[in-house]
Amino acid sequence: MLARSYFDESTPLSERPVVLPDMPKDAVWRGRFRGSREGVPFEFSLTTVDLGCWGARVATAYPEADQGEAEQRLDTLISGLRALAPSAQRK
């Protein structure tokens, strides 16, 4: 796992679907992990997005204290990807 090269340790926290407005059920899945780098606690995630005929994977890392804001910004990014999807693929 790439995270091992950046963090001193890593622990899985969760893997689950993410419910976002205007996204089909189970179109977005996120795995969250906790780790530390030089003594600073971090969270990082891998999010996969199914946009019909194409998809995306987004890897993020952020200080644990910024987790709420980071996930909001990530969800905004994913919504932006959805807006770029071909209209024929939208359900």
Image: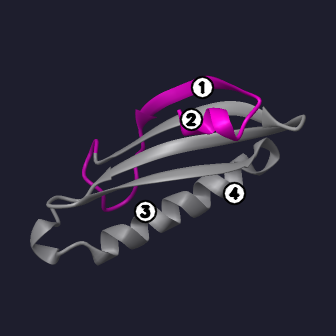
Dot 2 alpha-carbon crowd within 10 angstroms: few under 14, some 14 to 19, many 20 or more: some
**Tag 1's secondary structure?**
strand
Residue type, label 2: Arg
Residue in view at x 56 percent, y 39 percent: 2
Taking 72 as reference, is 10 above or below it? above
Relative placement, left or right, of 70 versus 19 is: right
**Tag 2's secondary structure?**
strand
Q: Which residues are magenta?
A: 1-26
Farthest residue, direction front: 5
CB under 8 Å between discs 3 and 1: no
Q: Position of residue 89 (x, y in %)?
A: 13, 66
The residue beneath circle 2 is: 32
Of badges 2 and 4, the one in the foreground is 2
Asked whether residue 20 is drawn in magenta, I would say yes
Residues 62 and 83: in front is: 62
> Sequence-wise, which precedes: disc 2 or disc 4?
2
Q: Which mark is residue 89?
A: none
Q: Quadrant of residue 91?
A: bottom left
Asked whether residue 58 is drawn in magenta, I would say no
Dot 3 alpha-carbon crowd within 10 angstroms: few under 14, some 14 to 19, many 20 or more: many
Q: CA distance from mark 3 to mark 4?
A: 14 Å
The residue beneath circle 1 is: 13
Residue type, label 4: Glu
The residue beneath circle 4 is: 69
Q: CA distance from mark 2 to mark 3?
A: 16 Å
The residue beneath circle 3 is: 78
> Sequence-wise, which precedes: disc 4 or disc 1?
1
CB under 8 Å between discs 2 and 1: yes
